[in-house]
Amino acid sequence: MKSYTLEDIYTADKIPMQRERYLKAAEEFENLFGEKPTRFFSAPGRTEIGGNHTDHNLGRVFAAGVSLDVIAAVRETDDHVITVKSEGFPQDVIDISDTEVKENDKNTSASLIRGMAAGFIKNGHKAGGFKAYTTSNVLKGSGLSSSAAFEVLIGTILNGLYNDHAVSAVEVAQLSQYAENVYFGKPSGLMDQMASSVGSFITIDFKDVKEPVINKVDYDFAGSGYALCIVDTKGDHADLTPEYAAIPQEMKSVAEFFGKSVLREITKEQLLDNIKAVREKCSDRAVLRALHFFDDNDRVPAQAKALEEGDIDSFLRLINESGDSSYKYLQNIFASSAPNSQGLSLALYIAKSALGGRGACRVHGGGFAGTIQAFVPNDILDEFRKKIEAVFGESSCYVLSIRPVGGAEVSL
């Protein structure tokens, strides 16, 4: 794999700013370590586009790498020590000659660094020391997966420095998930890491969880006439764990009615044929959430097909259908435990009103609080942003682009 230029990664209007950003990172590296960096790396955040709450029942998802990323100025060392200073955070110094899981390091960036190195070694690849200064503009708590971007960044550095980029983007994503599951201690899925590592538009089919099927979807979003916006409603995710946990639990309860563990093992027709008995055993909400699963699972390949055929109108229609299904049937737009707090509902209303029947919008990520996603025609983008920020405040509407490459070495 070659290194990429700024022009390969970023849109033309962002090149001057990005060049300045990388040069500033190099300056910070030199101030910190007393020598110049020799190489630069980047990994993007991601956005979920289709398949809302389908992955935990082994469904399909549609995701993409976005223009916000974490970058690193790096210099290889001749020892087994990885030193990473991330802007705004304490410095991590990890001796990777010890790859044992450290209970005291769980839930820290140090655990992710050690886990990535351990994963490379476990899979027969090389790993060694380096110094890095990193800085990120991936929004935290926005559903854009800043943690996955960091994991993929460390993997991309190890891949470039010690493996001549021979480790595939898919394997880097799998090793990132391994680091997060085993070393960090969070049982995450694979979507976030895969979208960051591979970049562009991708579909992932989790039917065989050990060997998910990943397909890259070629589409020039920059030429579509639309901008991708993420709207931060400034909602609080605290105390919402029971709401999130109920979704997979209720979906799986429907599968268990048929003697299966996940919804992917049954069909929508089975559910509809037995719906009276399932309602009585599992609850109406469980049935509705299961129906959402089947419909959103089917939308993913339809969305991919629409983009592959250049049919942006059908793609946007499917985005709106997915959002409508999440609102009515998945019911993850506001928490039933906090009915007075409905930032996502309000954001969807404001967005639909501003779009005036054009574009598309939907909940983004887990739901209940946080962000929505909107595809906005370029000719009304400024007005859309103004209407959103009048409600949710300045800088609540982030205008992004789809990034054509994932984790990458960058040549300035």
Image (cartoon, rainbow, N blue to C red):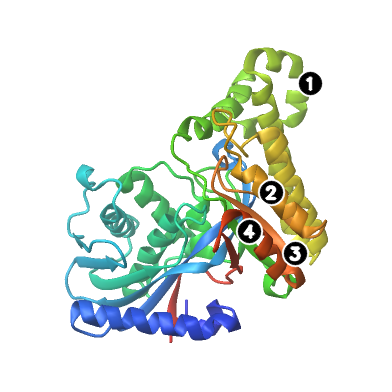
Label 4 vs label 3, nearer the camera: 4
Label 2 vs label 1, nearer the camera: 2
- The reply to whether dot 2 and dot 4 touch (C-beta < 8 Å) is no
Mark 2–mark 4 distance (CA, rounded to whole Å) = 14 Å
Question: Relative to 239, does residue 80 appear above or below in the rendering?
Answer: below
Horizontal side, residue 131 vs residue 298: left or right: left
Question: Relative to 214, does residue 340 appear above or below in the rendering?
Answer: above
Which of these two is toward me, 177 or 330?
330
Percent of width and height locating residue 184: 32, 47
State whether residue 388 appears in this view.
Answer: yes
> Which secondary structure, mark 1?
helix
Percent of width and height locating residue 91: 22, 64
State whether residue 216 appears in this view.
Answer: no
Within-10-Å neighbours for mark 4: few <14, some 14–19, many 20+: few
Percent of width and height locating residue 258: 64, 20
| Residue at the (30%, 64%) spot, across then down | 88
Res. 182 image quadrant:
top left
- Return the mark for residue 273: 1
Mark 4–mark 3 distance (CA, rounded to whole Å) = 36 Å
- Return the mark for residue 308: 3
Mark 3–mark 1 distance (CA, rounded to whole Å) = 35 Å
Mark 2–mark 1 distance (CA, rounded to whole Å) = 34 Å
Residue identified by numbered label 2: 348
**Looking at numbered disc 3 in the image, what kind of residue is underneath it?**
Glu
Horizontal side, residue 265 vs residue 313: left or right: left
Which quarter shows the C terminus?
bottom left
| Residue at the (52%, 35%) spot, across then down | 244
**Looking at numbered disc 1 in the image, what kind of residue is underneath it?**
Asp
Q: Which label's residue is closer to the chain start, 2 or 1?
A: 1
Label 3 vs label 2, nearer the camera: 2
